[in-house]
Amino acid sequence: MKRIIALMLALLMVGAVMAACGNSNNTATTETKAADSKDTKTVDASKDLANVTSKGKLVVGITDFEPMDYQKDGQWIGFDADMAKAFAKSLGVEVEFVEIDWDNKILELDGGTIDCVWNGMTLTEEVTSAMLCSDPYCNNAQVVVVNKDVADKYATADACKELSFAVESGSAGQEQAEANGFKFTEVKDQATALMEVASGTCNAAIIDSLMAGAMIGEGTGYAQLTYTVSLNSEEYGVGFRKGSDLTAKCNEFFASAKADGSMAEIAKTYGVQEALIK
């Protein structure tokens, strides 16, 4: 009899534990759904200008990309950074720069984490289909970067097929690597891609020609590197949410900055004046 009672008690305890686990799982699922529901929000892009004015700042998504956006003495500077500051000033607000994962730029924008993407962004089909973009303001190209001592061997895209490349994840450089059938490794940003080549981890990198002009060659930290073949031609634009009323304001700002010469002056500061779209 004692054994039977003990067995019954044990079965009751097991049932209680299983019920508790079942309730815990249900609670966790409910909490997760609630959290997911809370995290998911709809941003009314038609009120972007009012929201920026209300909060008193324009949040700009960027990466470390000299000469467009980079840090000096703890401050973000560069052609795009200075233009974004001037645009924010024209709206009567401050600017806040947020360093983003370039591969997640569309998610960051649609989720309301940032108000725009302003970072030497190539107007690819992916970008223009997912964002409402400004008028283009700079010409650019994707170029192959290699060590100077082997540059003469890689003057064509076909010759570069034997190389291992480093490319920024989600970038126009990656798009060109895929289009040309190159072997490549995705890295955080274009600056990291250059480091991979300099360290010998990869044979080559694909980066923006504007960045190549500013960061490699004589008088730079990458004097041993050079660029050879241009893989394409492209244009830069600023990306806003689909339907955003900030886009028209940005185009008005660009037109004014071109007319009064302030865009050209900022471009000269960073050596990109020849790339400006007149």
Image: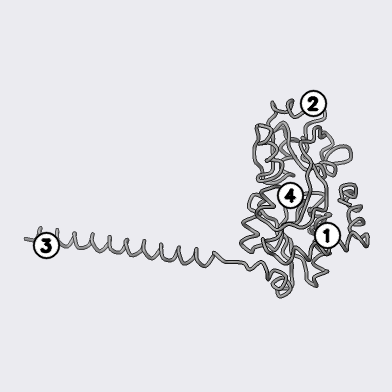
Q: Is residue 89 above or below residue 199?
A: below
At 78% from the left and 53% from the top, the residue drawn is: 69
Which disc is residue 112 wearing? none
Which residue is under mark 3?
A: 5
- Under mark 4, the amino acid is Leu
- Left or right of 226 in this view: 265: right
Q: CA distance from mark 2 to mark 1?
A: 38 Å
Q: Are marks 2 and 4 in contact (CB under 8 Å)?
A: no
The spot of residue 67 in percent (x, y) is 82, 49
Q: Which residue is mark 2?
A: 150
Q: Nearest the camera: 270 or 149? A: 270
Task: Report the residue at 79% width, 36% height from top.
Answer: 230
Mark 2–mark 4 distance (CA, rounded to whole Å):
32 Å
Residue with the mark numbered 1? 83
Report the residue at 75% width, 29% height from top.
Answer: 157
- Say whether disc 2 or disc 4 marks the residue closer to the N-terminus: 4
Number of other residues with Cα within 10 Å of mark 2, as a class: few under 14, some 14 to 19, many 20 or more: few
Q: Position of residue 84 (x, y in %)?
A: 80, 61
User: Dots 2 and 3: beta carbons under 8 Å?
Assistant: no
